[in-house]
Image (cartoon, rainbow, N blue to C red):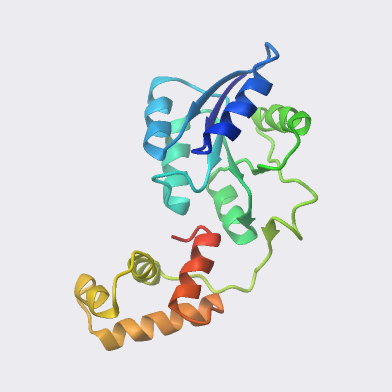
Amino acid sequence: MKILIADDHALLAQAISESLSRTSAFEVSITFTLQGTLDELSLAQYDVIMLDLRMPGMHGLASITEVIAKAGDGKVVLFAGQVDRQFLDDAITLGVKGFIPKTLPLKSLEIALRLIATGQTFIPHAEPSAAVQVDDKRPPLSDREIHVLRLAADGETNKEIAREIANTETQVKMIMRNICMKLAARNRAHACIIARERMLI
């Protein structure tokens, strides 16, 4: 079984690779960026792609869609410390085959990979109250709100954001207020933190 670990945590990726490669059942490769992953998938076919959500180049569902498209018949599974439940559900709708926590024991990882390779969706039963945070009532952010939030997360002021989206500062403040309401955030900085945790930006 050919496995691609796409994760910029080199020590973790190498440790998992070495463990899986001890048996003849697994052949493992590692990439550290989104672009590196896409390049590798253009060169070779993998059975399972373990996709880290925070490596360089990753931008939420849009990047996941790119990887799924490049993976062909390969099964893409999210590989992360935590993932928001709504985000996970959205990713599964796109074609992701579940979620492997980085804390999953290596023996359990082997079993999970075999299940995923057969097309089954893997979600650990112990995760809902811990790593997977359930928030089904959260109103979705619009594309425009996500764009504004990304600019805010990059450190741009309301004036700079207004210029970027061809609008007024007052309108930007209204958009930010709506974002904070939807995310139950105290302020724009808190909104950026929540959005990053939920892989929205």
Residue 128 sits above or below residue 95 on the image: below
Could you say which quadrant of the image residue 20 lies in?
top right
Residue sitting at 80 percent across and 51 percent down? Answer: 126
Residue drawn at 65 percent across, 68 percent down: 135
Kindly give the residue lying farthest to the front in the view shown.
11
For the residue pair 27 and 115, the one nearer the viewer reads as 27
On the image, the x and y values in percent for residue 47 come to 57, 25
Q: Is residue 122 above or below residue 16?
A: below
Residue 111 placement (x, y as % from top left): 76, 29
Q: Residue furthest top?
A: 24
Quadrant of the image for the C terminus? bottom left
Which residue is pictured at 55% across the width and 50% down the height? 91
Q: Nearer the viewer, residue 126 or 119?
A: 126
Compared to residue 91, the image places residue 43 above or below, namely above
User: As drawn, is 78 to the left or to the right of 141?
Assistant: right
Q: Which quarter of the rendering shows the N terminus? A: top right
- Above or below, 1 against 154 in this view is above
Residue 87: % across, % down: 57, 57
